[in-house]
Image: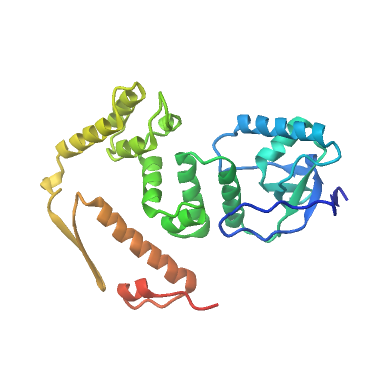
């Protein structure tokens, strides 16, 4: 057997995480039997990997009889190999140092794809924050895997504020994809809040023109907001309906808002979506929308 139990190994306390997976026994697994596959990141943090490798090398020199990796990887058995769920950077750093094996926690094999994806996101987030675009992509992936609302998907991956979820998805859907690499802080970048403001325009050419000015330092955040407001305010709406109230009536629920009040409209849609997901998930009866909002899942 290529994995051996290390009875002398003491697991360090795990840092706080949301809904952690069960902690299993720690085993040593040969490094060439570990498989790296992380689709929650757009790129690999080579700088962080190099720093880890240097730290491992120093530990080997200081205490050659101890393993330099103190935080176990979390893996799943996949045929003859082990799929890394959490600990990708430690794995690549171990390869650079030339480690023979790595400490691992072997997770239950019956975990579904969504649980594995969420666990990977939580582990990665502890070591390096996701970019806004990575967060948005991960939100959609969890929403698809779980069949849940976008607000629930955000909660599952550690983004508790529904408004932040909405902004992330607006940027993902409304900002030109080839300009995603410009989103960030510092010179030559488009701050995320500015990217969100620009995405509201819904016009590719206008977004590109203003983003170019932001990158060149010709527009501040406040100036960008003012320019976007000006552009949105001067666009003519069909039948001049921006200020006219629209009433949405559903069985047991009525909401009135103007075409310009998109936040109120989105809030209504998300409320109905979340309630519908809850009914479907727990097989609850539907009588009316107010009852649907008040329905609670049955006690286990």
Residue 277 occupies quadrant: bottom left
Residue 178 % position (x, y): 43, 30
Residue 31 occupies quadrant: top right
Residue 160 % position (x, y): 44, 55
The one nearer the camera, 40 or 67, is 67
Outermost residue to the front = 62
| Colour treatment of the image | rainbow
Count numbered badges in the picture. 0
Determine whether, in the image, residue 285 is placed left or right of residue 80: left
Q: If the image is split into quadrants, where does the C terminus sit?
A: bottom right
Residue 267 occupies quadrant: bottom left
Q: Residue at x 42, y 55 (%)?
A: 150
Residue 128 % position (x, y): 56, 40
Above-or-below relation of 14 to 170 = below
Residue 188 % position (x, y): 40, 23
Outermost residue to the right = 1
Q: Residue at x 48, y 60 (%)?
A: 147
Determine whether, in the image, residue 219 is placed left or right of residue 151: left
Q: Residue at x 80, y 46 (%)?
A: 29
């Amino acid at each position: 057997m290529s994995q051996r139990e290390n009875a002398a190994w003491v697991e360090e306390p795990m840092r706080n995480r949301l809904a952690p997976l069960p902690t299993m026994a720690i085993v040593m697994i040969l490094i060439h039997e570990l498989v790296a596959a992380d689709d929650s990141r757009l790129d690999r943090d080579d700088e962080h990997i190099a720093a880890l490798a240097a730290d491992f090398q120093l530990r080997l020199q200081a205490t050659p009889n101890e393993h330099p990796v103190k935080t176990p990887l979390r893996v799943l058995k996949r045929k003859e190999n082990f799929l890394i769920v959490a600990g990708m950077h430690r794995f690549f750093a171990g390869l650079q140092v030339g480690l023979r094996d790595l400490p691992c926690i072997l997770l239950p094999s019956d975990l579904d794809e969504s649980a594995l994806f969420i666990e990977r996101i939580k582990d990665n987030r502890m070591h390096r924050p996701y970019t806004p675009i990575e967060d948005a992509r991960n939100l959609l992936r969890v929403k698809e895997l779980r069949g849940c609302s976008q607000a629930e998907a955000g909660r599952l991956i550690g983004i508790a504020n529904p408004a932040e979820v909405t902004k992330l998805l607006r940027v993902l859907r409304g900002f030109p994809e080839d300009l995603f690499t410009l989103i960030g802080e510092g010179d030559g970048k488009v701050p995320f809040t500015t990217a969100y403001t620009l995405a509201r325009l819904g016009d590719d050419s206008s977004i590109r023109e203003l983003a170019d000015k932001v990158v060149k330092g010709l527009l501040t955040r406040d100036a960008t907001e003012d320019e976007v407001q000006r552009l949105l305010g001067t666009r003519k709406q069909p039948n001049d309906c921006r200020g006219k109230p629209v009433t949405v009536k559903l069985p047991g629920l009525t909401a009135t808002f103007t075409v310009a009040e998109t936040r109120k409209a989105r809030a209504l849609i998300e409320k109905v979506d979340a309630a519908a997901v809850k009914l479907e998930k727990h097989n609850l009866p539907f009588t009316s929308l107010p009852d649907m909002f008040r329905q609670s899942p049955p006690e286990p």
